[in-house]
Image (cartoon, rainbow, N blue to C red):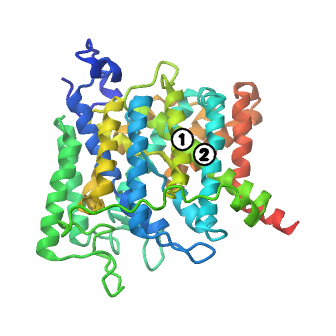
Amino acid sequence: MATAPTSRHDGPAPARPPRSGLDRYFSISARGSSVQQEVRGGIATFFTMAYIVVLNPLILGTAEDVEGRVLGVPTVAAATALVAGVLTILMGVYGRYPFALAAGLGLNAFVAFGIASQMTWAEAMGLVVVEGLVITVLVLTGFRRAVFHAIPGELKTAISVGIGLFIALIGFVDAGFVRTPAGGGTPLELGVGGSVQGWPTVVFVIGLLLTTVLVARRTRGAILIGIVVTTVLAIVVEAVAGVGGRTTADGDANPSGWSLIVPAWPDQVAQRPDLSLLGDVDLLGGFARVGLVAAVLLVFTLMLADFFDTMGTVVGVGAEAGLLDEQGELPGVQRVLVVDSVAAVAGGLASTSSNTTYVESAAGVGEGARTGLASVVTGVLFLLAVFFTPLVQVVPFEAATPALVVVGFLMVTQIRSIDFSDYTIAIPAFLTIVVMPFTYSIANGIGAGFVSYALIALATGRARRVHPLLWLVAALFVVYFAIAPIRSALDFL
């Protein structure tokens, strides 16, 4: 049995003959994995992304629409967990890869503050459904897969590396190890005031050091062990020190507190879910509310971000798992893209905003997951979270995020395959890598890489190297980056 975490950098584990129908269906042995690895990977992925059951309701459930309606935290929490569970299981059973899905961060904020502020929640979610339907059409016509094939191999590697830096930064920021200083100065700083302060940050550092040691020693279950041990430590620390959250009950700031979840065993373990948001959608009302042109621009913004966030995640996580073929393609990627497009529609229908493939899936890959069985495990845990939402709030960011930092390191090591002596590909690769973490967006990084690649190729007389689809996509990204002035110009007219 291969030790975990494994990655393509260690060489793929040797394939073995299938031992059962389950093994044969998911190609577990064929991908050098085992049922134990898949289960561990599925649990690790769930723990690193379970925060969405808490965070998505805080974004969508507390914002008001144009009529002052609030969806409510409990209802959004139940719907978030339900859709994530169903779609992640579908990804495992149909897509057969270790990718998990949930409400997309960034997309949910755009829906809450950029769309619902102009219309009702039902109308806003109707636009999300329309966006998902458009992406589904692009998948079924083969356009989305064709874009995958059109990307140069070294840009695909750059996407993987950029995602590695991105998820590492997510880990540092969510844990409070890196923050935006309150008094200005540098854009980011270490902890509070440039130093590590507060028990939560100490817990994160201990968890990070523990996980790195376990990974370096090739300990089986390293990432999952790190999350569990650090969570127990966090519960003990909170019970003894009573740190509290970053905002006190009186609304005062507590910079040394836990970033989102205060770790403690809940008084109530289970609760009856409220699923009243399911189907609360007005499909075309948004077009009547803000006008055809404005609604189309909103859908376009959602679609392009969703489209390329997923592409980057699939390429990056697939590369780390050693699942890509010699051409840098993911075999059977069409199945993955179908599920992801359906997830966008389902998120709108359930009022949780567009659901998408999560980069945190890399945590499960780092634990050894290679097949859809891991996604089934993650999905089942999300379904349980529908009824046991209080238990999800036991694991703080500070305990889950060390896994993201470690997996980020594993993904960044792929940078060795980029030829930095060829500036025509090295500069676009560099921009792809750095723009992702610096703008906190996978889509922005991909767009910067595509646009610069096309421009440099044109300026150096190598335009024929650029696939025709990449010219189209680069043009679409120019529109995407300039969407605000375009919208202002249209409003002026």
Left or right: 30 as drawn, with respect to 426: left
Residue located farthest toward the right when viewing the structure as drawn: 493
Residue located farthest toward the top when viewing the structure as drawn: 17
Q: Which mark is residue 342?
A: 1
Residue sitting at x 82%, y 67%:
491
Q: Position of residue 347 (x, y in %)?
A: 51, 51
Q: Earlier in the sequence, mark 2 or mark 1?
A: 2
Instruction: Quadrant for the N terminus, please.
Output: top left
Instruction: Give whichever of 285, 337 is nearer the camera.
Output: 285
Instruction: Give whichever of 261, 355 is nearer the camera.
Output: 355
Mark 2 nearby-residue class (10 Å; few <14, some 14–19, many ≥20) = many
Q: Quadrant of residue 234?
A: bottom left
Is 162 located above or below residue 31 in the figure? Answer: below
The amino acid on which the numbered mark 1 sits, given as a three-letter code, is: Val
The amino acid on which the numbered mark 2 sits, given as a three-letter code, is: Gly
Residue sitting at x 70%, y 25%:
465
| Disc 1 element | helix
Residue sitting at x 73%, y 66%:
289
Residue hosting label 2: 132
Left or right: 18 as drawn, with respect to 124: left
Q: Position of residue 257 (x, y in %)?
A: 28, 74
| Disc 2 element | helix
Residue contact at pointers 2 and 1, CB within 8 angstroms: yes
Regarding residue 419, the answer to whether it shows in the image is: yes
Q: Which mark is residue 376?
A: none
Q: Quadrant of residue 236?
A: bottom left
